[in-house]
Image (tube, rainbow, N blue to C red):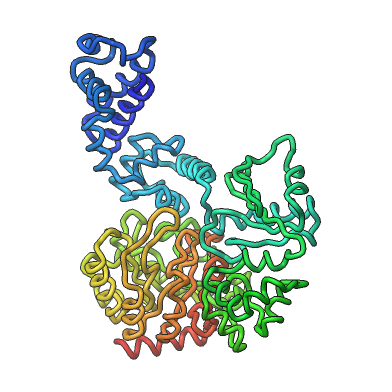
Amino acid sequence: MNNADIAEHFSLLSKLMDINGENSFKSKTYSIAAFHIEKLEYPLTETDRNAIASIKGLGPSVAAKVIELLDTGSMNVLQEIIENTPAGVREMLHIKGLGPKKIHTVWQEMNIQSIGELEYACIENRLTRYKGFGAKTQANVLEAIQFYNQNIGHFLYAQVATIYPTIQNYLNGLFGPDKVAPAGDFRRQMLIIKELEFVIAATPDAVKPKFQTAYPPELLEETETSILYKLTNGLKLRLYFGTDDFYKKQFLYSSGESFRNTFIEHFGKDEFDKASFSSEEHIFEQAGADFVLPYYRETSEAVHQAISKTLPQVLQVSDIKGIIHNHSTWSDGVNTIEELATDLIKNGFEYFVISDHSKTAAYANGLSEDRILQQHQQIDELNKKLVPFKIFKSIESDILNDGNLDYSNEVLASFDLVIASVHSNLYMKEDRAMQRLIKAIENPYTTILGHPTGRLLLSRNGYPIDHKKIIDACAANKVAIEINANPHRLDLDWQWISYAMEKAVLLSVNPDAHSIAGLYDIRYGVLAAQKGGLTKAFNLSSFSLTEFEQYLNTTKAAKI
């Protein structure tokens, strides 16, 4: 172990102690030791053990730990503090400008345990409510996180969507648009993208010279069938080679394994291998099946639907009539209710559901009972002003540890609808988590179960639940389930949509918006919902204003 490695161990120990709020004098001692060890002009491995304590900036206690490192390659005190600090919290040390003391605040006061959660908190404008985190610091943290994520190599669909057209146009310019075919996970609207994939009607020898520029992308892998590059923004770009079987390759690389295998079995493997096709549509035509758009090519059931001509007419963004689940300046949003409503009116929506945070969410300036009355008065005034557009009174009520909502029935009854969500204690075991959620679902005032697992893609797996039992409970209690359209969430996951529809449970694509821009995250919720085959009839936010009001009245009458 060289001096740099030893210094790094002590530097990490100092930082983790500060993150954990331990004695600052001790943590500074280890930081000073790291500084002096790194500056030594001779290796500690060749230093007399008895002389280590006399080295400037060390001392007997530090010397004992240096010797432990030299002898064992580890340090017990460091291992213990690593084990007691969540991995996601430790990872925050990679975020430029976010020092140990600030990380301590993020973890201990904000209850944030991963970079993804921290990014989401920045987007929701939550950091500014804590000492040492002004608007500028929050913006810098968000920028640093986004830079860090670029270098990891996994991206949310929404992050890739902004630059995908540029990459496709660049490839079209290099090879010609008739020789470039999109493929892969992005084309299938997968929630997380690891690689961008295209089929190029060219040979490897014709492809590689096109990328030998003054600033060439990094070549990561080369096989007989593809080349993998890493672009400067961190995205990986895989190019498959196709000539005579150009469209066949596009089909293969734009279909999930289950769908692909079932389809080829139906077609006949030998016949499929021998056949040539003039387009992707031609492949389905030759199989006697309706064309299946790439986003729906995940399951074998989709093949059977294509053959029997029973493919669903899936939800479109234009089917969304009202924007449900939104936050304003009354809690942690950045726009007023009127600003949000005015923008929606301009874009042709019929209604708007304001669902600010409830009183338990103190971190998000949740509403006390008195403030609820004040907000309702403001909504009444705005509804008179904005007619025929309507703003509905709602709340995102925290589900407490015991499954109760955080207001009395009298207060809950004052809302047009209640969205019940878990925001705290997200690491329960499944049995307790299920008891908690089902009790909330059984509350007669619960209208929608918000982001049911609480997951944050690429950063938090989410609440451990039995999806079927949750859906069954919602069916029994006339509770709709949110498909949270925030691209960090997309929760309920698309894989459970078909089961929910089978059980006649309404879903609701909602943006969980905290700004005007966030209102239009509904498009990402729709893209995710399409993968599960969600239809307009089963989406609550596709109801017209009249239908929505009738649904709320009928549901409330049946439950209360």
Q: Quadrant of residue 371?
A: bottom left
The quarter of the image holding the C terminus is: bottom left
Seen in the picture, residue 547 relative to 343 is either above or below; the reply is below
Query: x and y percent of residue 310 in the render?
Result: 58, 88
Q: Is residue 341 visible?
A: no
Residue 7 percent location from the top left of the image: 34, 23
Position of 89 compared to 243: left or right?
Answer: left
Q: State left or right for residue 88 relative to residue 27.
A: right
- In the image shown, does 58 or 256 lie closer to the viewer? 256
Q: In the picture shown, does residue 459 fall above or below 541?
A: above
544 over 13 or under it: above or below:
below
Above or below for 192 versus 1: below
| Tag count | 0
**Which quadrant holds residue 34?**
top left
**Relative to 107, is 296 on the left or the right?**
right
Q: From the viewer's perspective, is 413 left or right of 376?
A: left
The residue lying toward the viewer, choosing from 443 and 545, is 443
Q: Is residue 61 in sight in this rendering?
A: yes
Pick out the residue farthest to the front.
270
Q: Residue at x 31, y 16 (%)?
A: 45
Identify the residue at horizontal 72%, vertical 73% (top origin).
275
The residue at the point 35 percent across, 38 percent down is 102
Residue 297 position within the rendered picture, expressed as x and y whole percent measured from the top left: 57, 73
- The percent coordinates of residue 75 (x first, y second) are 24, 30
Nearest the eye: 389 or 546: 546
Residue shown at the point (34%, 23%) measured from the top left: 1
Q: Nearer the viewer, residue 275 or 376?
A: 275
